[in-house]
Every structure is written in C-alpha cells, then in structure tokens.
Image (spheres, grey):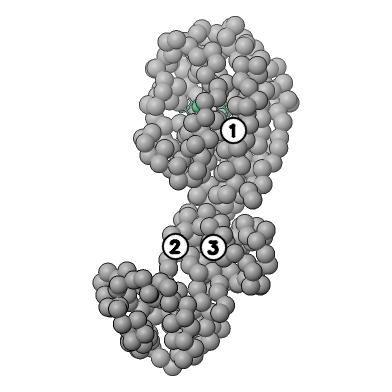
Amino acid sequence: MREIVLVKYGEMALKGLNKKTFEDMLIKNIKRRIKSLGQFELTSAQSTTYIIPLSDDIDLEEVVERVKKIFGIAALCRACVCEKDFGDITEKSIEYLRDILGSAKTFKVNAKRSDKAFPMKSPEICMELGGILLEKFPHLTVDVKNPEITVTVEIRDTNAYVHAENIKGAGGLPVGSSGKALLLLSGGIDSPVAGYMIAKRGVQIAAIHYVSPPYTSDRAQLKVEMLAQKLTAYCGGIAFYCVPFTEIQEAIKDNCPEEFFTIIMRRLMMEIAQRIAAKDNCLALVTGESIGQVASQTMAAMVCTDAVCRIPVFRPCIGMDKTEIIETARKIDTFDISIEPYEDCCTVFTPRHPKVRPKLADIEKAQSSFDFEPLIEQAVEGTEMKTFQLGN
Ligand code: ATP
Ligand code: MG
C-alpha cells in the first residue's frame, strides 16, 4: 500500500495573484527540511502539497514530525493512495484503517470530490463507504456530530486518498515570504520565543548576540548557540552574529551614571544591531521584551531605546505574560536550555536602582559625555558570524 503525506495550506491559501510565490517558498522549505530522510516528489494542487516518498523505506513518521514545524501549513496527514475506483477505495480503506477503526467506538466518513468526473457524489461515497466499514467493524457506531474518527476520502486529479488523522500544522506563513529581520538573541526564555513568533509570520531571522568576556563565559555563548540551533527547526538556517561587547560595557560603567547603565547599554546594543542588520539585508530588529517585565522594559525605557533606532523594532512578546511565554518556550523546546544558569552581558554591571521612568533628554545627556562611536565601530568590526543549519 502506498502512503503519502498531504499538506494543507494555512492563511496563504487565501492569497491572490501572489499565492504561487508563497507556495514555491513553502515547497522549498519542505524539501530542505526532509531532504536528509530520502527522495521525495512534491506536487501541489488546490492549496495542498503532496509529499510522495520515492522509496518504501522512508520514515513517514519523522517526515510528519519535521513538516509539523514548518510555517505556512494549517494541517497535515498521512494518507493512503488509491485508484479512483470505489472498489479500490473500500478495499484499501479497510486495510489502511484497520488499527485505528479497531480501537475506536464512533466514526463518520467525510468525502471531498474535487474531480467532478468521479461517478459517485460525495454523500453517496459517505453512505456507501460508511456502510461497508460498519459491516467490517461491527463494534463501531456512526456519530456525525462528534465522531472519534473521521475517515476522509479525497477524490483528486490523479488518485483518491484516504486518511483518518488530521494533524495540526504550525500555522503562519512560509519563512522567507516576509523578508528578513535581526533577532537580539540572549540566553533567556523570551527572545527565542520572539524569534519563533516572528518567523511564524514568514520572516526569516538572523540572530545577534552580545558577549562580554571575561564577565560572560564561553559556556554562556554556547548555550545561546544551542538556542539558535533549536530555532532552526522552525526558522530554517540562521546566521548568528556574536558581538564583543566588553569594552563598551566597561566604558559605560566608567563614564555614565549608574542608574542609566542598562538603558544606555540597550541603546548601544540597538546601534550595533542596526549596523549589522544593514549589512545583512535585515529590515527590522526583534527583541524578546514584554512590557513592564523589568525596569528596562517599561514604556518610558523603550522610548529611550527606540530613539536610536532607524528601523522598526518588533517585540512579539510585548503583550504576553511570562507564563504564556514559558508555555511557548516549552512547546518549541527551548525552555530547558534557557533556564540553564549562565550569566548574560545584561546581568553584569546591573545598576542597584535602575531608572524605571527615564527621560530621553537625561539619557542622551548622560550618553553624550563619552564618545562611544570608535568602540561601536570596533565592536561591529570584531563581530564574528557563523551559520546554523537545520538540525538533524
Ligand atoms: P530574555 O529572556 O529574552 O533574555 P529578559 O526578560 O531576560 O529577556 P532582558 O535581559 O532585559 O530581558 O533583555 C531584553 C531583550 O534584549 C531580550 O529579549 C533580547 O532580545 C535582548 N538581549 C538581552 N541580552 C542580550 C544579549 N546578550 N545578546 C543579544 N540580545 C540580548
Ligand atoms: Mg535576559
């Protein structure tokens, strides 16, 4: 029995003339994601992509696991390939669904006939197949409102397909269809979630991370690299920029009032980020900030940070509670890495009494007492880049 994976589009199914661009992007992302599992043919019709394995030894379970994480997909399922012949459809359904129907109590049949030349209409397919399945699996009853199992028969162009599972896809839009942004990635819980959320809207991400050796350790950097690697399952390949930030932090400490340390540091982070963004065609910055979470994330603090930004700063977690962010972090499997206790450059030289409502004029004045420009240039110059490719 031949089995394939059917992939149903999410929101992109509603696109107009440019739907093809989204579709091509999605197919490219799927191909890249499953390449290491064997040879496949991918074709598309009617807002569905068919992943057809070209050999029998391919692990379809793993294909599903990987494709589940690709943005742009509303739902997916494994399906049995049948001839467009009712006899073949019934025969294969009985065999293919034996286990799943054997252990269920209620079911219904749902038919979708996109090939109108097929001699039976959808209600007829449902009735006939439903009747046959009831005979074969007499312990079952039909429940049209709330069935445990919905057996779906799809009559399409070249074949008919039968399936009984519907796996929720990752939603969103295909990564790469909305341009590229630069994610400020720390070792914390929030920024990986922010990266995931922005990628969900089709944005390709590059990541930037600031290190301050010897105040921050190699192990702390490695932790962030592990987070970047984790994110590739959803976001695809990620260019990772590591910025040497020690001298800037020391200069802030030596030259600026303590209560403004964090805000000035964040302004300098943004300044460096946008210079790297310009070099790598990133149109926006992304952070894991959530309003009111800490002193540097009050609205007044963000006003001061954003004043140095010439490109948009996206903060997808802005309205989320920590518990909601943690929920997502667990879902995308970054939580356990994030909670490993390593220092971040943001936690060295933290002021004892940070200003919760800083005034932009005060911050600008404090920052202007020292010329940071040569250090900024030096940090950009000294930034190292490496690329993380899709896992496995
Ligand atoms: P996170 O959990 O993402 O670390 P947080 O609640 O700890 O966030 P902060 O430490 O104030 O908050 O950082 C706010 C945001 O600044 C982070 O979400 C991240 O986008 C960015 N950031 C903080 N530290 C770094 C770093 N060392 N390198 C890159 N970006 C950073
Ligand atoms: Mg942090």
Quadrant assignment for the N terminus:
bottom right
Amino acid carrying mark 1 in the image: Val
Q: Out of 242 and 360, give the one closest to the viewer.
A: 242
Q: Residues within 10 Å of mark 3 (few under 14, many from 20)?
A: few
**Where does the image place residue 75, in percent across and percent down from the top left?**
45, 63
Side of 360 where 25 appears, left or right:
right
| Badge 2 or badge 1: first in the primary sequence | 2
**Where does the image place residue 301, in percent across and percent down from the top left?**
44, 22
Circle on res. 61: 3
| Badge 3 or badge 1: first in the primary sequence | 3
**Where does the image place residue 47, in percent across and percent down from the top left?**
50, 69
Q: The residue tagged with tag 2: helix, strand or loop?
A: strand
Separation of marks 2 and 1 at Cα, in angstroms:
31 Å
Amino acid carrying mark 3 in the image: Glu
Q: Out of 382 and 31, give the one closest to the viewer.
A: 31
**Would you say the residues marked 2 and 3 are in contact, meaning their CB atoms lie under 8 Å apart?**
no
The yes-or-no answer for disc 2 within 8 Å of ligand 1 is no
The yes-or-no answer for disc 1 within 8 Å of ligand 1 is yes
Separation of marks 2 and 3 at Cα, in angstroms:
12 Å
The yes-or-no answer for disc 3 within 8 Å of ligand 1 is no
Q: Residues within 10 Å of mark 1 (few under 14, many from 20)?
A: many
Side of 111 where 338 appears, left or right:
right
Separation of marks 3 and 1 at Cα, in angstroms:
29 Å
Q: The residue tagged with tag 3: helix, strand or loop?
A: helix
Residue that carries the numbered disc 2 in the rendered image: 167
**At 62% across and 35% down in the image, what residue appears?**
225
Residue that carries the numbered disc 1 in the rendered image: 224
**At 54% across and 13% down in the image, what residue appears?**
349
